[in-house]
């Protein structure tokens, strides 16, 4: 399904999915996509989709609709396009349509034997080596042109390599500058990036060749910068007098020549900055070598190409950090929403309990007071459980290992949950293996881990319209060196698209009833023991969660299967 | 109408049911309790309560569906309902009151009493 993901603006982190047909975008709540942005018109724009083609059109909005930085009336959206409406910047993505030809028919991977291929590897090149591919071999004589061309290719390849190797913009820009200095005879250079907020150019990298006589300070003409930014073209400048009316030699001999190249960093969407280099030839050098330009059109072309590479990387990185930031915000929102739902329920319970206590007190009915008090107490326990889960989840802790009986732990949990289950018309059956020896584990931790999974199982079983069943079984698998507690329910099962988020903290499919902490906490406890939780789910039939724990006998001390250290009991 | 009015409480939370049950019984109102829609619908058909208190966060389905699901299953002449939770669109049943969560029990019980009184007055009116 195509979607718009807000990467900047008040709705940052929101993802709006939409289907074919008309989808309206605007500030008003009546729109399919409502943006909380005062610069968005009430009905601002609409997207019309049919047969995998989506077109955005502006609905005479006051501030206009922009695709990839350009104002549009109507524009066909491609996956990856930036759509700006008011101050809100969104990314359009569309899953690729069904491929027309199954390419696996045309490209097959098969074992050599089956294929009868006699090919063998003659030579291989590592990633590192490949960067020297264009280097000249000293034996071969080169024409100057060929040498330059190869040099340029080499520089381009290295720039591409640098881009692929780092997400750190500052490091990358330094590397790019280094490459430029290697291939162009520049004395000074700098990279400037456009600030996302102010739109002004900010110097990021500055480099001076050693022994440069001009000093570190670079002064760049605003006219040149404006020209480069506005036209998106690279320029080569020289202050050598070209006017025939002057005596060229005299002026050059007095001043020397300053040459500069300034190129835009043009990315996919926008110009993100400029790269500038300059050089000056002193009068003495001119006298010795004659008038020769140091910068050529070839240099300019190379610079434009390198700047493009760098710009793509800058855009990627900016986009990446915007995504990270947006996801983080979304995660915080999710956390708060889930927690506040749960806390609201606890509050509701406490209110109920206090109401009964008040009623009982005023009517001098002690049974009612007791009833109320029980409810208040139960909710206090819920708060402690929540805090405990949050602590277990948030900090590194060592499990409190001691010899214990896993069947005992399972029985305790089942007993504890029996009343709650019966209440929801769910029967909990227990099938315990009688051959499990006393093993070393953290009984309190395992109690919590099993409790969380059984609570989920009961809730899931209660979701089916008939009376539900939960089966808890233990098994000893000495050949695998582990014990297994499996909890099976006959609920609706877990939809395939929810499986991935199953152990993600603060994501609950149980609406207000879940904290979104149960499974992450269980999983954490199991991995502290060197165990794991395996999940199988059959939509419509139910799910099975298997908690697998390494079987560690007391007093062995050299447990191959366990990753945790065992303290002698 | 029965001698004493009856209320069906449908809520997943045992606590809520217990509080409402205790408070209403004290006031001479008969209560029926169910944790799930299916059971509640059966009870509504068999016992014909005067009022139904329905928790909208009953299961995974969205809030609007809970009410519709119940009405479809109960398949009886609909008594007035008090819905706990929040709903974007008011249900079709005109005798519906919505009480947002988290609510105060005092207010909820007063509301239940008011509705029952109105019903009582209406039923005494000559036909």
Image: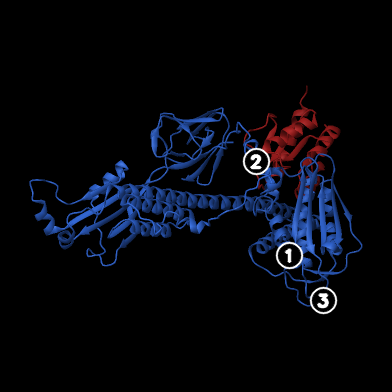
The numbered disc on residue A555 is 3
- Dot 1 falls on a residue whose secondary structure is loop
The residue singled out by tag 1 in the image is: A530
Are the residues flagged by discs 2 and 1 in contact, CB closer than 8 Å? no
Mark 1, other Cα within 10 Å: few <14 / some 14–19 / many ≥20:
some
How far is disc 1 from disc 3 in space, using C-alphas?
Answer: 18 Å
Label 3 is found on which chain of the structure?
A
Q: Which comes before the other along the chain, label 1 or label 3?
A: 1
Q: Which comes before the other along the chain, label 3 or label 2?
A: 2
- Dot 2 falls on a residue whose secondary structure is loop
Compared to residue A481, the image places residue A86 above or below, namely above
Name the front one of labels 2 and 1: 2
On the image, the x and y values in percent for residue A172 come to: 42, 57
The numbered disc on residue A223 is none
User: Quick check: A73 left or right of A460?
Assistant: left
On the image, the x and y values in percent for residue A76 come to: 47, 31
Compared to residue B115, the image places residue A553 above or below, namely below
**In the image shown, does A487 or A352 lie closer to the viewer?**
A487
| Outermost top residue | B127
**In the image shown, does A172 or A353 lie closer to the viewer?**
A172
Q: Colour of chain A?
A: blue
Total marks in image: 3
The residue singled out by tag 2 in the image is: A108
Asked if badges 3 and 2 are on one and the same chain, I answer: yes
Quarter of the N terminus of chain A within the rendering: top right
Which chain is drawn using red?
B
Mark 2, other Cα within 10 Å: few <14 / some 14–19 / many ≥20:
few
Quarter of the C terminus of chain A within the rendering: bottom right
């Amino acid at each position: 399904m195509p979607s718009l993901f807000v990467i900047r603006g008040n709705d940052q982190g929101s993802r709006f999915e939409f289907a074919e047909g008309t989808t309206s975008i605007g500030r008003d709540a009546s729109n399919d996509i409502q943006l909380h942005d005062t610069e968005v018109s009430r009905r601002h724009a609409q997207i019309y989709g049919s047969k995998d083609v989506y077109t955005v059109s502006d609905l005479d909005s006051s501030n206009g609709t922009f695709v990839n930085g350009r104002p549009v009336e109507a524009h066909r959206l491609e996956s990856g396009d930036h759509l700006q409406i008011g101050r809100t910047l969104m990314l359009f993505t569309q899953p690729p349509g069904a491929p027309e030809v199954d390419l696996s028919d045309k490209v097959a991977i098969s074992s050599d034997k089956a294929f009868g291929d006699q090919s063998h590897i003659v030579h291989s090149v590592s990633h590192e080596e490949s960067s020297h591919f264009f280097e000249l071999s000293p034996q071969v004589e080169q024409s100057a042109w060929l040498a330059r061309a190869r040099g340029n290719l080499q520089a381009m390849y290295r720039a591409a390599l640098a881009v692929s190797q780092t997400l750190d913009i500052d490091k990358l820009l330094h590397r790019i500058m280094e490459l430029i200095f290697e291939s162009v005879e520049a004395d000074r250079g700098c990279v400037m990036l456009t600030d996302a907020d102010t739109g002004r150019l900010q110097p990021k990298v500055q480099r001076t060749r050693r022994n440069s006589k001009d000093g570190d300070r670079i002064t760049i003409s605003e006219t040149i910068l404006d020209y480069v930014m506005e036209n998106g073209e690279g320029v080569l400048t020289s202050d050598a007098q070209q006017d025939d009316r002057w005596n060229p030699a005299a002026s050059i001999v007095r001043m020397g020549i300053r040459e500069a190249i300034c190129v835009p960093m043009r990315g996919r969407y926008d110009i993100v900055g400029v790269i500038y280099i300059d050089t000056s030839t002193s009068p003495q050098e001119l006298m010795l070598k004659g008038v020769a330009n140091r910068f050529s059109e070839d240099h300019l072309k190379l610079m434009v190409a390198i700047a493009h590479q760098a710009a793509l990387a800058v855009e990627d990185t900016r986009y990446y950090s915007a995504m990270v930031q947006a996801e983080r915000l979304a995660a915080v929102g999710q956390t708060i929403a889930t927690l506040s739902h749960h806390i609201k329920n606890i509050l509701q319970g406490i209110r109920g309990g206090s109401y009964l206590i008040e009623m009982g007190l005023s009517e001098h009915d002690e049974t009612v007071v007791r009833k109320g008090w029980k409810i208040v107490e139960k909710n206090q326990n819920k708060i402690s459980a929540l805090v405990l889960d949050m602590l277990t989840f948030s900090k590194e802790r060592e499990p409190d290992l001691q010899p214990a009986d896993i069947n005992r732990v399972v029985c305790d949990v089942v007993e504890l949950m029996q009343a709650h289950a019966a209440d929801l018309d769910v029967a909990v059956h227990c099938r315990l293996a009688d051959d499990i020896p006393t093993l070393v584990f953290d009984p309190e931790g395992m109690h919590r881990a099993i409790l969380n999974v059984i609570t989920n199982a009961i809730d899931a079983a209660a979701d089916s319209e008939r009376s539900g069943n939960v089966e808890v079984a233990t098994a000893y698998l000495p050949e695998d060196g582990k014990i297994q507690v499996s909890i099976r329910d006959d609920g609706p099962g877990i939809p395939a698209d929810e499986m991935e988020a199953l152990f993600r903290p603060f994501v609950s499919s149980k609406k207000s009833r879940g904290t979104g902490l149960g499974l992450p906490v269980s999983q954490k406890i199991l991995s502290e023991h060197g165990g794991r939780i395996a999940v199988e789910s059959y939509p419509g039939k139910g799910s099975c969660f298997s908690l697998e724990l390494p079987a560690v006998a007391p007093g062995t001390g050299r447990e191959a299967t366990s990753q945790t250290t065992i303290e002698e009991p | 109408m029965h001698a004493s009015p009856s209320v069906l409480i449908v809520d997943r939370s045992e606590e809520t049911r217990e509080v409402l049950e205790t408070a209403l019984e004290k006031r001479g109102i008969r209560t029926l309790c169910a944790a799930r829609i299916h059971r509640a619908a059966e009870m509504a058909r068999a016992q014909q309560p005067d009022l139904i208190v329905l928790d909208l966060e009953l299961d995974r389905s969205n809030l609007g569906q809970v009410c519709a699901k119940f009405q479809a299953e109960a398949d009886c002449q609909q008594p007035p309902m008090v819905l706990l939770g929040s709903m974007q669109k008011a249900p079709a049943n005109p005798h519906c009151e919505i009480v947002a969560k988290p609510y105060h029990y005092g207010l909820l019980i007063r509301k239940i009493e008011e509705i029952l009184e109105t019903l009582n007055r209406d039923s005494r009116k000559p036909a």
